[in-house]
Structures are given as C-alpha cells and as structure tokens.
Amino acid sequence: MATLKFGVSLPKGQEDAAFATEAEELGFDYVSCGEHLAFHGPTTNAFVNLAAAAGATKRIELLSAVTLVPLYPPALLAKLVAALDYLSKGRFNLGVGVGGEFPAEFAAVGVPLQERGARTDESLEVVDRLLTEDEVRFEGHFYRIGPLTIKPKPVRSPRPPMWIAGRTEAAMRRATRYGDAWFPYLYDPRLYAASVDSVRRFAAEEGKEWRGTNAYFAFVTAYPDARRARETITEGIGRTYRQDFTSMSDKYLIAGSPDTCRRRIAEYIEAGATTIVVRLVAPAADFTPMMRTVAAEVVGPLRE
C-alpha cells in the first residue's frame, strides 16, 4: 500500500511563513495555496505566498492548489514554476485548474472563458517542454514560442509534478495526458472512487498505465460541537463560492468532531486516495488551533 501523505492549505489573512513553519513541525507533507486574479473576496497569488513559505521551511513540499493555468502565458508560467522549484530546492508541485467561476478575471487578461480548457491543455504541453528542454519551438493554436530556453531549470527532475484538479471528464483526461496526480474536490467518497477508476480507464485507452498520485482536496472543519462545525463550514464555503451549501454539506464537506472527520477522511482513503490536502474552514482565531487538532487527532491516527 502506498504511503499516506497529508497537506494543509495556508489560511487567508495570516502570516504564511509562520504558518508554514508550524505545518512542517506538525508533520504535514505539503503546504498548499490557492489563487485567483480576482474573486468574490480578497485573494492571493500562490507563487508569491509559497515563496514566503519556502523561505521559512526546509522539508515540507509546496503545492499550488490551484494555479489557474489559462490566466498565464505559458512561458511566464514555466518561468515561475522553475524559479519557485529552484528557490525551494526541488519542493514545488504545480496544481492545475481551469477556473471559470469568476468570468471577470478572464476578461481582465483577454482570455475568452470558453477557451480555458483548450488553452490549459496547450499551455501544459508548452510548460512541460520549457521545463525539460532547451531551444524550445512551439506552434500551436493559441501560443507561438521560440526558440526559447528557460534557465535555471527546476531542481526536481525531470520537472515539478503537475497535479490536475477538477471534477469533469475533461479534467480526468487531462490528468492522464499531462498529470502526475489526479486532484479533485467536492466529491463524496463514491464519486471519488469512480473518478479514480475513470482516470485509469482513460489512461488505458491511450495505451498507458496510470501511475500517478490519487489525491483529494478536502474542506474540513473540526470542532467538538458537531452542529457548530457544520454551521461554520457551510457558511464559510457558501460565502467563498456565493452558493448555498446547506443541502450538500454532509455529502461534499467534512465537518464534525475530530473523530468524525477522521472517519470521513478514511472513507476517501478506502476509495483510493493516497494523499489528502486539507483546507480548513474556520474563523482566523481558530485556524491554527484547529490545524494542531487535525494533525494530532485526524492525521496522526490515520498514519498509524
């Protein structure tokens, strides 16, 4: 059986370096950060925040969860990936998302919303080549590059892993073509198991065997009071996505006592996940204590 690994997301509005240092001390394998150019509330940039985390840590791996790939010119994205991996001495992982929940950020950079999937696929091909080759020439539908060499190259060989996020068949097929990890979110364990089977099937259709990491991005709130936990996570995620999650909270979100959260995460592990990245949903004052609780009472026992 594959070794289980666990990650935790940087909280919004808190000190990234200090949080990442504590996450490392608590034994998490990854610290992650998401991003938007603009969204319903304040947002950040994964490369900037993870650079701060890189400078404060030595072991923990860094994961953009996720980078909205179609918002970046691929040559610029390749440079950022290489630079952060070089800075962190080979600890960066590129989480790949296509976005689309906030059309204004696409309009702001001149990317038609309906092209985001196709642009992502073409961009990933370019990024892969720029990170592993010199004198790259590329003529695609959206991008024309070269000859171009990105230096310094990433420390990680042949390049930093690409974690393909999403919930659709297109995302699953993208994982088999370009990815080193399948990384969905807002699934229940049954849907997660079905997605892993689909990724394996799509890989086989292309004459490959899926050997990537099966990861899951989990929204978690752990309080002794189960009602408080459910209310906190439902309100928090609803505010983030401007959507009412009341009827979906028990299915797609993980909330309750630490024991309840542990048992629910175990269901995803039984469904095939070998890596769980936790996005804690809590008020700022509770975030670090909750991370400590999750490390001790959820992650620790699952590793045993």
Image (cartoon, rainbow, N blue to C red):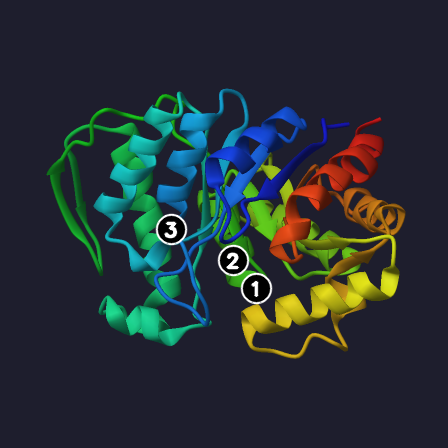
Are the residues tagged 1 and 3 within 8 Å (C-beta)?
Answer: no
The residue sitting at 42% across, 32% down in the picture is 160
Question: What's the mark number on residue 114?
Answer: none
Residue corresponding to mark 1: 168
Q: Which of the two discs, 1 and 3, labels the residue nearer the N terminus?
A: 3
The kind of residue tagged 2 is Ala
Residue 59 position, x and y percent, is: 53, 21
Q: Quadrant of residue 99?
A: bottom left
Locate residue 295 relative to residue 227 in the image: left or right: left
Q: Residues within 10 Å of mark 3 (few under 14, many from 20)?
A: some
Q: CA distance from mark 1 to mark 3?
A: 25 Å
Q: CA distance from mark 1 to mark 2?
A: 5 Å
Are the residues tagged 1 and 2 within 8 Å (C-beta)?
Answer: yes
Q: Is residue 24 above or below residue 202?
A: above
Q: CA distance from mark 3 to mark 2?
A: 22 Å
Q: Is residue 8 above or below residue 303?
A: below
Residue corresponding to mark 3: 45
Pick the residue in front: 204 or 273.
273
Question: What's the mark number on residue 171?
Answer: 2
Mark 1: which secondary structure?
A: loop
Pick the residue in front: 39 or 170.
39
Locate residue 193 relative to residue 74 in the image: left or right: right
Residue 256 position, x and y percent, is: 84, 57
**Viewer-nearest of discs 3 and 2:** 3
Locate residue 299 relative to residue 94 in the image: left or right: right
The kind of residue tagged 3 is Asn
The residue sitting at 20% across, 32% down in the picture is 150
Mark 2: which secondary structure?
A: helix
